[in-house]
Image (spheres, rainbow, N blue to C red):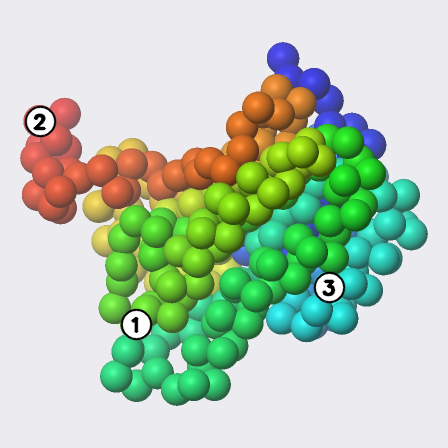
Amino acid sequence: MFTSLAGRAVVVTGGTRGIGKGIASVFARNGARVLITGRDSDVARAAAEELSADGAEVSFIQTDVSSREDCRRMAANAIERLGGIDVLCANAGVFPDSLLADMTEDLLDQVLGTNLKGTVFSVQACLDALKRSGRGRVILTSSITGPITGYPGWTGYGASKAGQLGFMRTAAIELAPSRITVNAVLPGNIVTEGLADLGEEYAASMAASIPLRRLGSVDDIGYAALFLATEEAGYITGQTIVVDGGQVLPETLEAVLEVKGSG
């Protein structure tokens, strides 16, 4: 049985919806004290109230992680409210769709500013508190898109997610003397609000290409992050966990269909 994380101070950026909200929910349900961030204060407030419904300790602060000053304010608030920071889940991200030929400089700046610079700024802002923790954990939400796979329209997104892993590996070396680990979770296709908008037929076609025959849940990602925050994962750093139901394994869709036909 893993050592309890009850009472640990956890910051989840982009924790107001989707995967981030799922990560925050898993930590809160396991007794952690959680601060979530988001750019929309109304959405963040509603998410914090929902996550606190069963007595969990969840609060929010409006934050744009692409702003270094906002990240510093986020960290200061976490220290004031939670007494420190034990775990930073750097999850905030955007994924606007744009083919390479059509991509504007503003769009690229938006994606890299939130997904990559936002990751760096968040870690920098929380660094002193994570050092004081003595058991600091940084957990990045990357993606299979970029580090492993590609998808038309997501060149900027893929570049930002691959960039997170380059940052992770060197940050893990630099922060190891302070007993801070830095790891990443790489989600595949996860059921979120955005996916629901695409319809059941689209979701079914996506699930058909996954060996486990289903899309992932936000809890699947949350529990992977939770594991990386445990005492038992304290000797793991600079590593990635792919949580995708086996999506990246088949060479072709036919490989999945062939197994399905023989099962």
Between discs 2 and 3, the one toward the N terminus: 3
> In the drawing, does residue 130 fall left or right of residue 24?
right
* Three-letter code, disc 1: Gly
Would you say residue 86 is visible in this rendering? yes
Q: In this figure, which residue is indicated by the disc labeled 1?
A: 153
The span from disc 1 to disc 2 (Cα, nearest Å) is 35 Å
All told, the count of numbered labels is 3
Q: Quadrant of residue 69?
A: bottom right
* Three-letter code, disc 3: Cys
Would you say residue 64 is visible in this rendering? no
Residue nearest the viewer, comparing 209 with 99: 99
Q: Quadrant of residue 5?
A: top right
Residue nearest the viewer, comparing 71 with 32: 71
> In the drawing, does residue 198 fall left or right of residue 36?
left
Assign a secondary structure to mark 3: helix
Q: In this figure, which residue is indicated by the disc labeled 2?
A: 262
Q: In this figure, which residue is indicated by the disc labeled 3?
A: 71
